[in-house]
Image (cartoon, grey):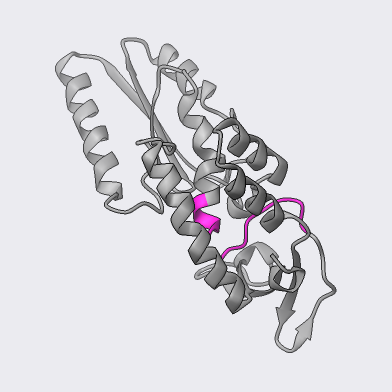
Amino acid sequence: MPTKWKEAIVKMIPKPIKDHTDPNGFRPISLINTFSKLLERIIQKGLVDWINSNKIISDFQSGFRKLRQTLDHLIRLLQKCLESFNKNKNLGAIFIDIEKAFDKVWHKGLLFELNKLQIPNYLGLWLKNYLNKRLLRVKIDSELSEAIEPLTGVPQGSVLGPILFNLYFNDITEIDTQAELALFADDLASWTVAKSSRIIEERLICMGCLIWAVNFIKKK
């Protein structure tokens, strides 16, 4: 991909009911070159075909996927609640939002994951180039910042960003903690059933931060 196509202008969109004197009160959206987005659309088809034909993304992930919705996970949780009630057991759950999810995608970690998943060579090489030497400038009103080269993150507003995030975060579904998982993009829920509340706490704590270089939003 030409270097010029990898340059982006980042606009800061105010989040509703947030402190707009704090940078965290804004959501960064990348304005990407039109030709880049067209090329991403072409690559997207091959990438999605490979993901679907090899069943790469876990069924626990419903975000950014066709014919999937949060209701699927709510039904699972409701069924487990009824089951635990009928068996006179306790159920515990945690609900987590990943902090700055798109910004925390570690490029080297993502490429490692893709290689481990045996992505076709042409897709792997293209995505490596796509992530390498990206430049962004932040625009506020008429002011434009100096260009910086991020070492983490996928562009918010890009075509491939959501798919790459799902691939990067997919590993968490392989963690064996005896707790069930439900994912919708960067929102995570985990629950488990046991006689003892202490066992429930131990299982849910194990879910903590067992993922690549990602933190959780503590305020939530």
Give the image quarter of residue 150. bottom right
The N terminus sits in image quarter: bottom right
Residue 7 image offset from top left, x and y in percent? 72, 71
Identify the residue at horizontal 56%, vertical 47% (top origin).
219
Identify the residue at horizontal 52%, vertical 23% (top origin).
205
Q: Which residues, given as a range, are shown in magenta?
A: 150-163
Q: Is residue 166 above or below residue 59?
A: below
142 on left or right of 215: right
Q: Does the magenta-highlighted stretch encompass residue 49?
A: no
Residue 132 image offset from top left, x and y in percent? 75, 55
- Which residue is outermost to the right? 146
Q: Is residue 80 above or below residue 188?
A: above
Give the image quarter of residue 6. bottom right
80 on left or right of 181: left
Tell me how many marks there are: 0
Residue 88 image offset from top left, x and y in percent? 20, 14
101 on left or right of 63: right
Identify the residue at horizontal 51%, vertical 69% (top origin).
17
- Which residue is outermost to the bottom? 142
Q: Judge whether residue 220 can be spotted in this image.
A: no
Residue 184 image offset from top left, x and y in percent? 40, 47
172 on left or right of 189: right
Q: Does the magenta-highlighted stretch encompass residue 152?
A: yes
Q: Judge whether residue 113 can be spotted in this image.
A: yes
Identify the residue at horizontal 38%, vertical 36% (top origin).
55
Q: Main secondary structure of the magenta part?
A: loop
